[in-house]
Amino acid sequence: MLRAETIFSPADRVRHALLATVARASPALVASREVRVAVGATALVALAFLLTATLPLSLLLVGPIVLGVPHVVADVRYLVARPRLQARPLLWALVAAPLVWCGFGGGVRAGAVATCGAFIAARGVRWVRLLGIAACASLFVVASRVGPVVDLVFAHFHNFAAVAIWLAWRGRAGRLHFVPLAVFAGCVLLLVAGVATPSVAGYPYDVGGAIVPVGWGSVGARLIVLFAFAQAVHYSVWLRFIPEEDRARPTPRPWAASFRALLVDVGPWVVATSVLAAVALATYALSDLVAARAVYLRAVVFHGHLEIAARVLLFVERRLPLEGAPPAS
């Protein structure tokens, strides 16, 4: 059986050479997590904005195919596996079970039940938990009466929620994280104002219809483009920002070490299944990209509600997500 060092050795040699070059030019980029995350996050937000302004349809269609499965694995890894939430049987009944309903049309109603379950199971201040339960009950009633529009609103909300989760991931001594946050906010304002909104005329309804109601005209077009940008940033949060924040060591680690840590956190079966799912999705996309995207969205509709429920539980228990996790070098 091939070891991680054997598989990733060529990539790690290239990576080491690049890091050595960067360290000579700017040692802080390698030695300081705060500097590296601020620079990297700003660059990724700027790239997401550039691609949104030029290729929004590509972001909407190709993004989920390439980055969708890995980012769901990151959700499970950092919000469930590393804080060891899977070891609490009550959460399987109160949170995991309602999330299954999401895949059968439960939508925000199922998410409200799952988040309510997180408040019930949380070990925290009673009045906070009671307020949360009441809020979830109210959301369930609203979602039941309003219908699919609430699910569309949540689709947008969960992209922005990822940014909030990143900001709350660890205690911070400096203020460099405000730089990418300010760039993100500025890009959102430009897209909402229509300053940098490209045309989305002729988009397949299977793409735009999952984001905005029919007949919203120019407002709907801006929301579609805004979703493309926020979704790209959402993927960056789970695949780059949070992995950097979660590591105990402030410096980067080799690809082989990262892969071993992934196996420790989620187990080889999850990794293998995820790889197979990603390959199958990409293969299907070669024949029908729009349909493949729709299949992916139906399969992972639970993940946005998982993000909220898990983060609520950790908030009520006054835990940062990385607390209680096994050491990660």
Image (cartoon, grey):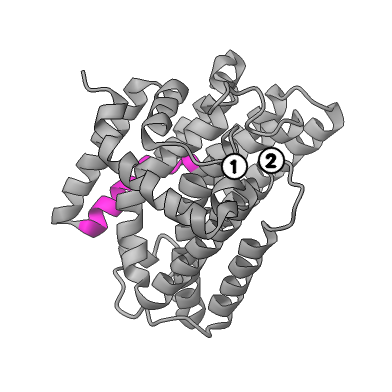
Q: Say the numbered circle drawn on residue 245.
A: 1
The residue wearing badge 2 is: 170
Q: Identity of the amino acid at label 1? A: Glu
Are the residues at dot 2 and dot 1 in contact (C-beta closer than 8 Å)? yes
The quarter of the picture where residue 91 lies is top right
Residue located 69% across and 39% down the image: 137
Q: Residue at x 22, y 57 (%)?
A: 289
Are there few (<14), some (14-19), or many (20+) residues within 10 Å of tag 2? some
Residue 317: mark: none
Q: Quadrant of residue 153?
A: bottom right
Majority SS type along the magenta span:
helix
**Residue 212 place in picture, x, y as percent:** 47, 66
**If the image is split into quadrants, where does the N terminus sit?**
top left
List x then y, in percent, for residue 118: 65, 29
Judge by depth and name the residue closer to the eye, 228 or 40. Answer: 40
Mark 1 falls on what kind of element? helix
| Image: magenta residue range | 289-303
